[in-house]
Image (cartoon, rainbow, N blue to C red):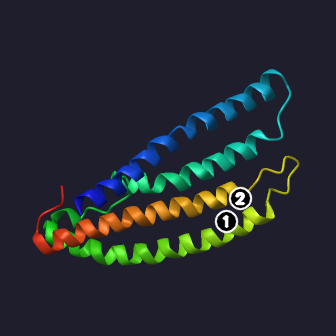
């Protein structure tokens, strides 16, 4: 079981680290637009749309990494005072809500992403940035998030049964 959990964690960490480099590309696009607009007085029609699309992909693909590293917001006022076994029980309940939400996200995103890809959907602007990569990244990112959630559920189930955490 540890091997499966380590593989899931490894996938989340790898995709998170690779995806994090998108911020450099986004920054480069925005800096290019700033120079083009304010120094050369030649604004682009593509920089805003590209940076927005890349940021959407960035956010969609980083969810599993943030979940794997414990970076999501947690209300610790009462939670931190509970025993590990009780926390695991509370987590198991909240994981069910997570799975419902994430399942709906993945289902809808795959349908909408595939439809968008087949239609080669793009923005209705002068540049016409393709939308389907963003929609498909939501589907991929949601699937990765669902997979990482499954790993968290297994860890909490183990802790509820044994009182110990899986290392």
Residue 82 visible to the viewer: no
Q: Position of residue 17 (x, y in %)?
A: 45, 42
| Left or right: 36, with 166 as reference point | right
The residue labelled by disc 2 is 132
The residue labelled by disc 1 is 113
Distance from the alpha carbon under mark 2 to that under mark 1:
6 Å
- Residue pictured at 30% horizontal, 70% vertical: 153
> Badge 2: how crowded within 10 Å, few (<14), some, or many (20+)?
many
Question: Where 52 falls versus 123 (above or below)?
Answer: above
Q: Earlier in the sequence, mark 2 or mark 1?
A: 1
| Left or right: 49, with 165 as reference point | right
Q: Position of residue 167 (x, y in %)?
A: 18, 55
Local secondary structure at mark 2: helix
- Residue pictured at 74% horizontal, 46% vertical: 49
Front-lying residue, 5 or 89: 5
Residue found farthest to the right:
126
Question: Where 154 falls versus 71 (above or below)?
Answer: below
Kindly indicate the quadrant of the structure image that contains residue 33: top right
- Residue pictured at 34% horizontal, 51% vertical: 69
- Residue pictured at 33% horizontal, 61% vertical: 74
Question: Where 62 falls versus 81 (above or below)?
Answer: above
Q: Position of residue 56 (x, y in %)?
A: 62, 52
Residue 83 visible to the viewer: yes
């Amino acid at each position: 079981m540890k091997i499966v959990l380590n593989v899931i964690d490894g996938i989340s960490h790898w995709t998170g680290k690779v995806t994090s480099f998108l911020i450099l590309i986004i920054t480069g696009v925005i800096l290019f637009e700033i120079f083009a607009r304010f120094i050369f007085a030649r604004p682009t029609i593509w920089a805003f749309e590209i940076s927005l699309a890349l940021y959407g992909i960035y956010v969609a693909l980083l969810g599993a990494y943030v979940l794997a590293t414990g970076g999501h917001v947690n209300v610790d006022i009462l939670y931190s005072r509970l025993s590990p076994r009780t926390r695991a029980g509370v987590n198991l309940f909240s994981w069910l809500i997570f799975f419902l939400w994430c399942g709906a996200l993945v289902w809808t995103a795959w349908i909408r992403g595939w439809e968008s890809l087949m239609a080669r959907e793009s923005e209705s602007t002068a540049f016409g940035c393709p939308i389907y990569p963003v929609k498909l990244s939501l589907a991929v990112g949601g699937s990765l998030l669902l997979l990482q959630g499954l790993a968290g559920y297994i860890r909490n189930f183990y802790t509820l049964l044994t009182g110990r955490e899986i290392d």
